[in-house]
Image (spheres, grey):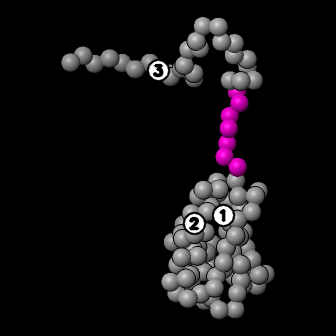
Amino acid sequence: MSTETLPETIPETLPESPGTVVTPEMRSRTGYMPLYRVIMWDDDVTTMEFVIRMLFKVFGKDYKTAERLMLEVHYTGSAHVDTLPLERAEFKVDQVHKAAALENYPFRCSIEPL
């Protein structure tokens, strides 16, 4: 078995097929997934502990940040808790809604475009 060394740099693109014209604009175009805000809404039933737990477990916030966001939800009625691509935002909102349903809370989150 021989050991080949890899090139120090990896080429940016594959070679183009014959007859293909590639302009500089085409090479530098990068597609990013659009981002969405996840908003948590206050209600009169859901406990503060539950909101902190969702921020900690579902959104990966540290305890101090989770507590600050929970207080923002409580005192202002809503809080922007994360910015994510649509699929991830929908998944996390679904996780929160299912956890709230399991504990019989009417807690809601929503998603809005950035």
Marks 1/3 in contact by CB < 8 Å: the verdict is no
Q: Amino acid at mark 3?
A: Glu
Residue 82: assigned label: 1
Front one among 30 and 62: 30
Q: Amino acid at mark 1?
A: Asp
Position of the C terminus, as image quadrant, is bottom right
| Residue 76 visible | yes
Is 31 covered by the magenta stretch? yes
Q: Which mark is residue 92?
A: 2
Is residue 72 in view? no
Residue furthest toward the left?
1
Q: Is residue 72 magenta?
A: no
Query: Is there CB contact under 8 Å for labels 2 and 1?
Result: yes
Mark 2 or mark 3: whose residue is earlier in sequence: 3
Give the x, y percent position of residue 33.
66, 46
Which residue is disc 3 drawn over?
8
Which stretch did the figure color magenta?
A: 28-34
> Is residue 68 positioned above or below 60 on the image?
below
Question: How far apart are labels 1 and 3 at the CA level?
Answer: 38 Å
Mark 2, residues whose alpha carbon is within 10 Å: few (<14), some, or many (≥20)?
A: some
- Identify the secondary structure beneath mark 2: helix
Total numbered badges shown on the rendered structure = 3
Q: Nearer the viewer, mark 2 or mark 1?
A: 2
